[in-house]
Amino acid sequence: MMQNKVVLLGIVAVLAFVRFAVVPWHEYQQSKYQQLDAVTKRLQRSEALVEQQQRLIEMQQQQQQQLATMLTPFPKVTNPSAYRLQLQQQIQQLAEENGVAVTFFDWLSDTPMQVFSLSRGRISLRLKGLAGNIMSTHSLIEQRFPNFIVRDVKANWRNDLTPQSEIELSLLVEVDYQEQEAQ
């Protein structure tokens, strides 16, 4: 019987050792394995980014170049008031070169577009002259100012329309430009 008690005490001691020493040690090893696995995955992602660094830099440069190309038609403006006056003078000069008078020029509004520092102005413009000259001037305005969007065109004339007819052309134009801080 004594021998059974010794065996039972040995079994209890082994079970206690397993429960209080081996199981916590195994759980500790498992947690360390999980931490090591998480750190290994982060390291692999970091290494992948380092390997892709040159490609990412090239892609970023390419996107910046594409953006610069896309924004080329939009003039860079540090002073919107001065730009309005300059634009009015350019249009008047273009019209005069083609024998057309600018009878009305009004900058109606400015609206920030909230992308790439672009703003959109609205202009009401009225031109008067011979039909052929008016058509030529209108065409030149659209060619020389790629940042213009003509939203509305109205023409008035008397009698039959010929290239020599006196016409008054009203345009509603949207002007896109890039606002920049003065340097």
Image: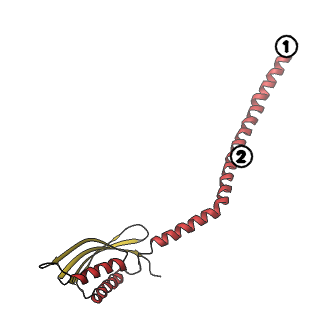
Q: Name the residue under label 1.
A: 4
Q: In this view, does 2 lie to the left or right of 161?
A: right
Residue 92, image x, y percentages: 28, 86
Q: Which colour scheme is used?
A: secondary structure
Q: Quadrant of the N terminus?
A: top right
Residue at horizontal 44%, vertical 69%?
116
Q: Position of residue 107 (x, y in %)?
A: 27, 78
**82 relative to 113, above or below:** below
Q: How many marks?
A: 2
Q: Is residue 50 above or below residue 92?
A: above
Instruction: Name the amino acid type tagged 2.
Output: Leu
User: What number is the disc on residue 36?
Assistant: 2
Dot 1 lies on which element? helix
Compared across the picture, whether 124 is left or right of 48 comes to left
Q: In which quarter of the image is residue 47?
A: bottom right
Residue 171 position in % (x across, y down): 24, 75
Residue 155, position as x, y percentages in the image: 19, 76
Q: Earlier in the sequence, mark 2 or mark 1?
A: 1
33 relative to 97 in the view: left or right: right
Name the residue located 69 percent from the left edge and 42 percent from the top edge. 34
Q: What residue type is labelled 1?
A: Asn
Q: Is disc 2 surrounded by few (<14), some (14 to 19) or many (20+) residues within 10 Å?
A: few
**Residue 54: quarter of image:** bottom right
Name the residue at the right extreme. 3
- Rounded to the nearest angstrom, the CA distance separating label 2 from label 1 is 46 Å
